[in-house]
Image (cartoon, rainbow, N blue to C red):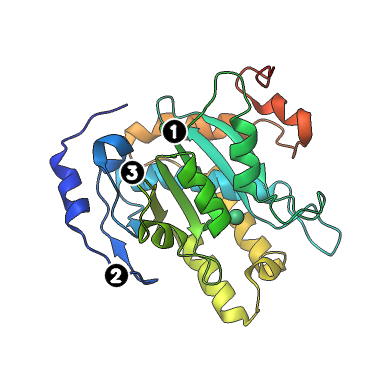
Amino acid sequence: MITIAKSLAISVFAATLAFAGCASVNQTDTESLTLSELGKPAIGVVHEDVTTLIGERDNLYSLAALTLVNRDWQAGSETRGHNIGSVLVDNATGEIVYYARNSNKILASGCQHGEVRLVTNFLKCEGAGPYLHDYTLYTTLEPCIMCAGMLTMTQIGKVVYVQQDPDYGYTQEIIGSGNYPIYYREATVNSNFKQLLERGYKQSGDSSITKWLIGEDAHQIYNDAELALLNYKPVFEDNNAVYDKVIKFLDKELPEHFNDDMAAQCPTGKFKEFY
Ligand SMILES: [Zn+2]
């Protein structure tokens, strides 16, 4: 874990935010500190600038999450689930250590969101758990309240989403405004793909973001995001290693696994043995 000047954290604590969709704080370098060092994060999403070191890094992993979804794009009525997916990054190594996509339909279960599938199955892996302090989750759509609750209870350090969900979002703010002793820091990178997705859904007039996310307009943006990632040249030298890890992840076949087959994605290829 990289240590940085803790004075930077003061700006986070100093930021008092209203519980509103526009609530935001400026980017800081506080993510290198653990939640226990930081205490409670400020309520509200941090809008990161893509032209900063951390913003570029978080943009690369966010593009990896978009690409994960694009690689198994769902269209029509017979689908695995919604076009939403997540990747988990080990902060110490920068490796993408797990992934999952929404599988609500194929499993006929309204709780099979990508984040739930990722966290519950990763925590079954040998050597993992019980908490996720030193991990960052990158997800294509802002977590819903179910996932936000799970991410809080597993004490994840940070969550980064791409597209804001005006219908089921603002969930870190909801939990943060309650009396929980801990909750995660949340960020989003102000990338052009984020803007295209958010503007596209707003202008579509669709009543459901998941419905819009099976459409061709959304698919085109996801395709463009994958192409942009594959052709990306990091601006910050320190992010060359991040880019290499992202490409190493995307070089693998990334099928959606189910049940015990999800052990194949574990760092050791195995789930824990239970007794
Ligand atoms: Zn969810």
Q: Which residue is disc 1 drawn over?
A: 242
Disc 2 residue type (three-letter): Ala
Q: Is residue 38 left or right of residue 226?
A: left
| Residue indicated by mark 3 | 54
| Up/down of 80 relative to 64, above or below | below
Q: Is mark 2 within 8 Å of ligand 1?
A: no
For numbered disc 3, what is the local secondary structure? helix
Judged from the image, the secondary structure of the residue bearing numbered disc 2 is: loop
Within the image, what quadrant is residue 39 found in? top left
Inter-mark Cα distance, 2 to 1: 34 Å
Of callouts 3 and 2, the N-terminal one: 2
Structural distance between the alpha carbons of marks 3 and 2 = 25 Å
Task: Check disc 3 and give the amino acid type.
Answer: Ile
Residue 3 percent coordinates (x, y): 23, 29
Ligand 1, seen in the image, is in the quarter at bottom right
Marks 3 and 2: which is nearer the front? 2
Q: Nearer the viewer, mark 2 or mark 1?
A: 2
Residue 157 point in image, percent of width and height:
39, 40
Q: Residue at x 43, y 24 (%)?
A: 93
Q: Residue at x 76, y 36 (%)?
A: 257
